[in-house]
Amino acid sequence: MTTTINRLFDDHAAAMEAVRRLEAAGLQSSDISIVSNNADNWYSGKNGRSTSGRVDRDGDGVDDRAEAAGTGAGVGATLGGAGGLLAGLGILAIPGIGPVVAAGWLASTALGLAVGAAAGGLIGALTQLGVSEEEAHAYAEGVRRGGTLVTARVPDNDRARYEEMLSGSVNIGDRSAAYRKTGWSKFDAGAQPYTTEQIRRERELYGTRRG
């Protein structure tokens, strides 16, 4: 039997390192998924490195990742330079969140549920796993505000060991409470994605810095 662990990270580099730890401990890449906000273009798909380059395949002067955000369309799947799950990172878009860097089964499920649907694909994917609706909304909002969600399917009898490898993640209950203090109630797939500046302010609020 397996169980699913979900963890939100404010820092994408910490999330990537957590994925590497899971794989080094023997967890298969097919049992791990990652969804990371890419509003600030930290990842371009070119050897897994940050760049400010624009993706504009239709030549209309607008970044295709932003255009696709309203439809949930995939807008790229260039391999990165890492191994395992991280070698399959691609850039796509999720309604209400915008451009994300993603790989794995949860990302595929979220995208499939989002296309042509009013509800958030990430919410649906998480609730299908048995995550409560309240927590699913908090995880999706966390990604919307610049975070990275790591999800892992692990053996029931080895859960504690794998949870230790996801240290440094956000306490989702505390973070949800902090969101609610600002008037937030739930993730809105129809809302505008956060801008780079809004995400910068979020990181300052929670004391997170990214390179």
Image: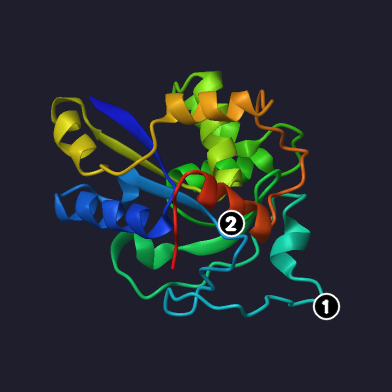
Residue corresponding to mark 1: 61
Taking 125 as reference, is 79 left or right? left
Picture quarter containing residue 169? Answer: top left
Taking 146 as reference, is 69 left or right? right
Image location of residue 33, percent across then percent down: 40, 47
Image location of residue 129, percent across then percent down: 44, 27
Front residue of 65/74: it is 65
Residue corresponding to mark 2: 200
What's the residue type where badge 2 is placed? Arg
The crowding category of the residue bearing disc 1, from other C-alpha atoms within 10 Å (few below 14, some 14 to 19, many at least 20), is: few
Give the vertical position of 66 relative to 21 (above or below): below
Front residue of 190/203: it is 203
- In the rendered view of the protein, which quadrant contains the N terminus? top left
Q: Looking at the image, which residue is at 66% across and 35% down?
A: 120
Q: Is mark 1 on a helix, strand or loop?
A: loop
Image location of residue 210, percent across then percent down: 45, 62
Which numbered disc covers residue 176? Answer: none
Image location of residue 186, percent across then percent down: 65, 26
Cβ atoms at labels 1 and 2 below 8 Å apart: no
